[in-house]
Amino acid sequence: MANTYNTPVDSPRPQPTFPSPTPGDPHRVHWPEYLLLMADAVERIAGDAECGLFIANHILAMHRQARLMGAVSPADHLAKAQAEADRQAAYVRALEEEAGHWALGPGPDAGDPDLGGWGAHPDDASMQAWIASPVDDTWMN
């Protein structure tokens, strides 16, 4: 998107310094390298300005993401990033559903304690543990 706030209407449109990457074109840079060039250009233009460094860091993060995903174009990058976000959301949703199945119940403050499937009070439950010994493996019940 072009910023036309400070550009006169009749001025010619500047040519891009880095041509847009085209998948399979050996004369143009690949998408991850294009992002790296953009981050360098933003940082060079901004100097030590905080805003420019902030934007450059975000472009570098997109560069790393594109390289890791193997994205070859902006559309491919967007599609792969969305698929990864959907996969992560499904994983978290599955964890939350599984945690709902293992809920411990009302707890000891609610009167009758529910120990989440143990079926008895802690005094009635048997205890099994290892007695730590470097020589022998002895069980305690």
Image (tube, rainbow, N blue to C red):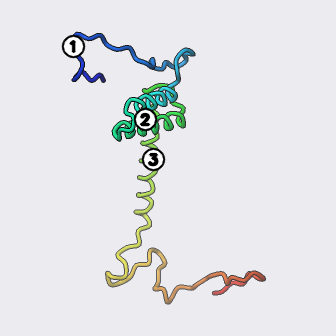
Alpha carbon separation for disc pair 2 and 3: 22 Å
Quarter holding residue 103: bottom left
Q: Do callouts 2 and 1 mark residues in contact (Cβ within 8 Å)?
A: no
Find residue 56 and report its horizontal and vertical position in percent: 41, 36
Which of marks 3 and 2 precedes in the sequence? 2
Find residue 47 and report its horizontal and vertical position in percent: 39, 34
- Taking the image as shown, residue 47 lies to the left or right of residue 7, namely right
Quadrant of the snapshot with the C terminus: bottom right
Between residues 111 and 64, which one lies in front from this camera angle? 64
Disc 3 designates what residue? 88
Quadrant of the snapshot with the N terminus: top left
Amino acid type, label 1: Val
Disc 1 designates what residue? 9
- Taking the image as shown, residue 85 lies to the left or right of residue 4, namely right
Quarter holding residue 38: top left
Disc 2 designates what residue? 59
- Taking the image as shown, residue 138 lies to the left or right of residue 8, namely right
Q: Residues within 10 Å of mark 3 (few under 14, many from 20)?
A: few
Mark 3 or 1, closer to the camera: 1
Quarter holding residue 3: top left
Badge 1 element: loop
Which of marks 1 and 3 precedes in the sequence? 1
Which of marks 1 and 2 precedes in the sequence? 1
Find residue 27 and report its horizontal and vertical position in percent: 55, 14
**Disc assigned to residue 28:** none
Badge 3 element: helix
The residue under the point 78% across, 82% down is 135
Alpha carbon separation for disc pair 3 and 1: 46 Å
Mark 2 or 1, closer to the camera: 1
Mark 2 or 3, closer to the camera: 2
Alpha carbon separation for disc pair 2 and 1: 29 Å
Amino acid type, label 2: Ile
